[in-house]
Every structure is written in C-alpha cells, then in structure tokens.
Amino acid sequence: MYNLNGQVAIVTGAGSGIGRAITIRLSLEGAAIVAADVDGMAAEKLIREIKDLGRRGLSSEIDVSIAKDVERMVKGTMENFGQIDILVNNAGTGSTGLIIDHSEEDWEKPLQVNLKGTFLCSRAVAKEMMPRKRGRIVNISSIAGKSGEEFIGAYCASKFGVIGLTQVLAKELGRHLITVNAVCPGYVWTPMWENLALWFKENFPSMAELSPREVFERRVKAVTPLRRPQTPEDIANLVAFLVSDEARNITGQAINVDGGAVMQ
Ligand SMILES: NC(=O)c1ccc[n+]([C@@H]2O[C@H](COP(=O)([O-])OP(=O)(O)OC[C@H]3O[C@@H](n4cnc5c(N)ncnc54)[C@H](O)[C@@H]3O)[C@@H](O)[C@H]2O)c1
C-alpha cells in the first residue's frame, strides 16, 4: 500500500472499466477523488460507493475533449479540495476498420478524446501543480501506442501520440518536480473490448459463432506469452505505484502491463 492521505486525485473516464479500478485503488490509498466522466451518472454512482466507504470524493460530468468542460472540472476540484496532486488521463474511446475505410469521424473521435483530452486536462491541471512544486500525471496509453495494429488505425495513432505527449510533458514539467508517465495496458475485458469483439464477430465469418468473450480470449492466447488477460486492477497497481513517493525518480516512461504481448 502507498500512503496518499491528504492528496487529491482526478481520474478521467472513471465511470467504467480501468478508470473505475484506478479510482477505487487511489481512494483506498487515501486520496480524495474527483471522478470525471462524460457518463455523469456512472461517475456519480462510483462517488456514492466511495463515500459509503468513508472516503472523500466528487463527481464531474465532463467531455475531456472540450476545454471549457475541463476548466469547469479543475475549478470545481480547487473549490472543493484546494489542491490537485494527481491526474490520471484515462478517458478513452476507439474506432474500427481499415484506414482506407475510416471516415473523418472515425479518425477524429479517438484523436479528440484520447489525445486532445490528455492535452487539455494536463494543461489545466499542470498550472495548478506548478506553483506547489509537486504533482503526478499518468496517461493511459496502450500497447497499441507502441506497435501498430490493423483495424484500429486512428486509435493507434492517438495512443502513439499520448506517449509522445508524455515525453514532452515530462521534459517541460520536470523542473517543477512533476512526473509524467504513461501506462500501456494490453488486453483488459471492459466495455471497450466488448465493442471491439462485436466488430470482429460481424466482420470475420470465422468468429461469427464465438461469443465476444471468446473472441477476446482467443486473441489474448495468440499474442500473450503469459496466456492470460490483464485485469483493471493490474493496471491500477502500476498507476498506484507511479503516483506514490516511491516512484519520485521515474518520469517520461511508457510502461506496459500486458503479459509480455509487446516487448518495447
Ligand atoms: N480495455 C483494454 O484492453 C485497453 C487496452 C489498452 C488501453 N486501454 C485504455 O484504457 C482506458 C480505459 O479504457 P476501458 O477499457 O476501461 O474502457 P471503458 O469503455 O470501459 O471506459 C472508458 C470510460 O471513458 C469514458 N469516456 C469516453 N469518452 C469520454 C470523454 N470524451 N470524456 C470523458 N469521459 C469519456 C467513458 O464514459 C467510460 O466511462 C482507455 O484510455 C483505453 O484506451 C484499454
């Protein structure tokens, strides 16, 4: 366990999957939580659970790709808690298909949410962290940000971009003693992967008879040396370490939690 008592953490995309696990973990470590999500009801439900555990929290219904939403989230956090110590840029979305079949919307959606959202939240939060000479930013990228993958081209481009932005921010914010790292999950069964599995089923006759979960498991076994998927809690474990004092000398890194699927 890491002691985050007295610290304040913003987690975007907190309402589902990996973001939900990160939020619960940081809360159990002692941080007060701002759970931000475009799905305001999911964020609110999570905060009620956190408060039932006797912890502090606030929900914020925002779209991370809209600057004024992000400013409202930061203002609300400062008014309620007076400081921001941790930002986890986790909100994410995808699109599917060959690049030659991508519409402009297919291209823009992942870029807007995954990359621009990370830029907007980091920009707004870093300004609050800098005067205090402390802060931790963790960006959830993907192994698809390290190795190009067919059928998810715009998503890959956005996640490569997140790793580049992580390195830039680590260099620019280092003098303010703010660390910035990326975490790259491999295969985690969440609503995002379920949508991808449904797309594979619809587009590949060989997968039509499989359940979405079987499509996922088959992929995991084919590409993962450890032959098992990752859990949201596996990802939260690394995030908890990276925001702790024990990781004070780690910045600008992009670390995979993927059972060895990608080794770079
Ligand atoms: N599931 C995986 O295998 C996997 C692998 C690699 C990386 N990731 C990344 O992990 C992160 C979390 O994904 P997940 O699998 O938990 O997906 P998920 O779909 O379960 O959760 C994503 C959350 O982000 C929220 N969100 C989407 N667009 C938003 C926006 N514009 N503003 C605010 N919130 C928004 C959604 O409402 C949802 O609560 C994403 O960045 C994703 O790319 C996931």
Image (cartoon, rainbow, N blue to C red):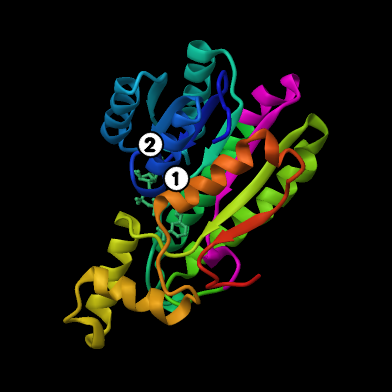
Residue picked out by circle 2: 37
Ligand 1 is within 8 Å of the C-beta of the residue at disc 1: yes
Query: Would residue 39 appear left or right of 34 to someone viewing this image?
Result: left
Q: Position of residue 168 (x, y in %)?
A: 74, 48
Counting residues from the N terminus, which is met first, the one under dot 2 or under dot 1?
A: 2
**Is 71 placed left or right of 172 in the picture?**
left
**Residue at (31% x, 37% y) in the render:** 39
Task: Write the start and end of the magenta stretch as one range.
Answer: 125-147
Marks 2/1: CA–CA distance: 7 Å
Q: Is 211 located above or below residue 175 in the figure?
A: below
Image height check: is 14 above or below 68?
below
Where is residue 166 drawn, in percent x and y?
67, 49
Which quadrant would the N terminus be assigned to in this image? top right
Q: Nearer the viewer, residue 56 or 105?
A: 56
Q: Quadrant of the C terminus?
A: bottom right
Question: Callout 2, which amino acid?
Answer: Asp
How crowded pointer 2 is (Cα within 10 Å; few <14, some 14-19, many 20+) is rated as many
Q: Secondary structure at mark 1?
A: loop
How many dots with numbers?
2
Q: Residues within 10 Å of mark 1 (few under 14, many from 20)?
A: many
Compared with residue 91, is residue 210 higher up or lower down, i.e. above or below? below
Q: Amino acid at mark 1?
A: Ala
- Is 103 magenta? The answer is no
Element under label 2? strand
Mark 2 Cβ inside 8 Å of ligand 1:
yes
- Which numbered dot is residue 91? 1
Q: Are marks 2 and 1 in contact (CB under 8 Å)?
A: yes
x and y percent of residue 142 in the render?
Answer: 52, 60
Q: Nearer the viewer, residue 64 or 107?
A: 64
**Residue 74 percent across, percent down from the top left:** 53, 23
Residue drawn at (40%, 35%), measured in percent from left and top? 24
